[in-house]
Amino acid sequence: MTRKITYQQAINEALAQEMRRDPTVVVFGEDVAGGMGTDQEKDAWGGVLGVTKGLWPEFPDRVLDTPISESAYIGAAAGAASAGLRPVAELMFVDFMGVCFDQIFNQAAKFRYMFGGKAETPMVIRTMYGAGIRAASQHSQSLYPLFTHIPGLKVVLPSTPYDAKGLLIQAIRDNDPVIFFEHKVLYTMQGEVPEEAYVVPFGEAAVVREGDDVTIVALGRMVHMAAEAADTLAAEGVSCEVIDPRTTSPLDEETILESVERTGRLVVVDEAGPRCGMAADIASLVATRAFEFLRAPIRTVTPPHTPVPFSPVLEDVYVPDAACVTEAVRSVTVRQFT
Amino acid sequence: MSDVQPVGMPKWGLSMTRGQVGAWIVDVGDEVSVGDDVVEIETEKINGVVESAVSGVVRRRVVDTGAWVPVGGLLAVVADPSVPEEEIDRFVEEFQAGFVPEEEDTEDGEAGPETVEVGGRAIRYARWGESGDPVVLVHGFGGDLGNWLFTAPALAERHRVYALDLPGHGGSAKNVEPGDLASLAQTLLGFLAVNGIDRAHLVGHSMGGLVAMAAALRDPRRVASLALIGSAGFGTEMDGAYIDGFVGAGSRRELKPVLQRLFADQGLVTRQLVDDVLKYKRLDGVGASLRLLADELFPGGAQRHVLAGDVGALGLPVLVVWGDRDQVVPPSHAANAPAGARVSVLEGAGHSPHMERANDVNRLLEGFLSGA
């Protein structure tokens, strides 16, 4: 049965259902149990924003609070995964990943390749990303392009409660390391989610709106900005196809290319910075593989190449919104190659 | 009847909140009779045609092609030619002023699907209509109660209508063991029992028709009539590749051509329809259940059970409906209909005439049920 729950509840439900199904699934991270570490804390907090709430009382020996040492417990997750467990490690904010890059980039991502397939690393790192909650430069970045760059990692960024649950279940069942990006602003978003467990496969984009005039590829929270822009533009007679890749590695190139072959126009909307980001990557994909179909220049919509500002006024300007997307689409629908 | 009549946006299925106006079939000034096609409507899930519920002259087309209109919103106005223009204008003005679109999140006045336990298994169903003899709608392989979105509201005007999800389907429990025809028929009879239905008209599509026939053979006293649409159980031939394709398809790209085999008009297979079926197929347990059902009922790509002859011996009223372009179960099977059955083969329809030619099928069902 399907009912409406939030993005945050969808993530919690995916974890609970997979832990019930598979005794090798373990959850650990800072404060994921209760933050208190006491046996009496039945109403444990469940992570900094409460995403893992309720798991520790049900699975007291499989939900572990860790010391504040990302390098230690991410390394432990990689080791546990190669030794037969399916750890889901929570690394609070993706901004903190810097201290454990070696464990992720050089160890977890390389085990299967360097050991000739004899080792598998079925680990998931759940982490929060994105601006919009006044959390300043060290808690607001959208760093998924860094991880997308590394072969051996799978990178997932759900934009809806339905996708959050299905992609997380797929992430847990997947035998490769998966970095699972949760946008803080989306936690309260409601959507239809089946009660049963299900998977959303990696590398399959969602087509959020169908349209003929322009393809908008948008990632994570930006999918909603693009959908809003598409509604505005529909009233002006501009029909937008909105594509949510859902995973940046693997990337569903085919759906993007097929769409641009039809529409001849591309706008990419990304909350990550403009240099070496997904917007640049997808623009390059289309420019090299579907150039002959383009009827107008490709446009990218991203924040500027700056840290995320703490000033609320500046932060609001920094994050692309629906108006930015609308403007970009108009700029490619009024001009075209002859 | 008042002289001025609105033609409103219909509600096809529980989740529909609005529809997009497609091509207009009538012009202002055209005369329409009850049942005439007025305008095409597209929704996120399905496309259909609005029929006139009244007779008269089309006096206004209130919305243009491409516009999105909420359920219940005004599409056109039909009136007697004698009604003056000012009165039509006033009607439109008053309608628009008083119209409150249904809130997206409230479902008052219309219950969502419910769940009952049948034989230890959760079975989801939906109900329409307050009075009249009960009619139970049984979907086909891989379908669910949503397949009756055009049928249920129409039949509900004169009947209490139930549509259930068979085991392994829709919102019902996903285990189907043992997955044979007897267990499905038992579930259907059990569903009647838990709902306190002594005797029902059964309407079955494809595999659902086979299940309905099997239920009638198990307990004929509980079945008032059978309406069988593109039904299994009339012969051994079928498109086995359809079943294999449906069970095996793991992506949109693989599934879309399979679903297109269900319809003569392939434009009916919208992206949303494909996505919805994929969402269902990706639920834990569905793949194995579908495989088991397919192996039990359609082993080696042929139908195991041919029941039409036995059903003829029951002497029940039977309606048989087929689309002449059915690619899944051959329309030639209509010739094997039980003795005494009313048989209708619809031109230009595929395997799902109740979706593709909903208005025609509704008329056939209403006529059949009123006489059955």
Image (tube, coloured by chain):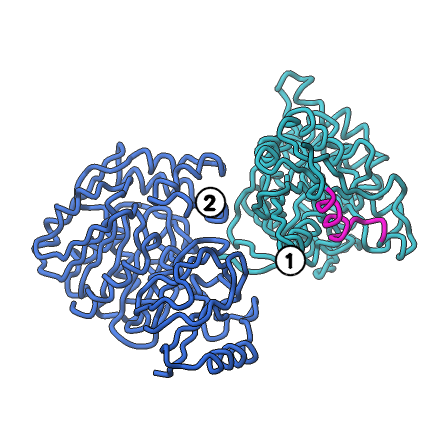
Quadrant for the C terminus of chain B in the image? bottom left
Q: Amino acid at mark 2?
A: Val
Which chain's residue wears label 2? B
Above or below A99: residue B276:
below
Mark 1 surroundings: few (<14), some (14-19) or many (≥20) residues within 10 A: many
SS type, badge 1: strand
Q: What chain is colored cyan?
A: A
Alpha carbon distance from label 2 to label 1:
24 Å
Q: Determine whether A99 is above or below A129 in the image.
A: above
Residue drawn at x 38%, y 54% as measured from the top left: B144
| Amino acid type assigned to the residue bearing label 1 in the image | Thr
Camera-nearest residue between B2 and A134 = B2
Residue A321 in picture, x, y percent from top left = 76, 52
Answer above or below: position of A76 versus A90. Answer: above
Horizontal side of residue A320 vs A253, given as left or right: right
Q: Are marks 2 and 1 on the same chain?
A: no
In the rendered image, residue B292, in percent from the top left (x then y), is placed at 33, 40
Q: Which residues are magenta?
A: A317-331
Residue, disc 1:
A6
Quadrant of the image containing the N terminus of chain B: bottom left
Which residue is identified by label 2? B274
Give the blue chain's letter. Answer: B
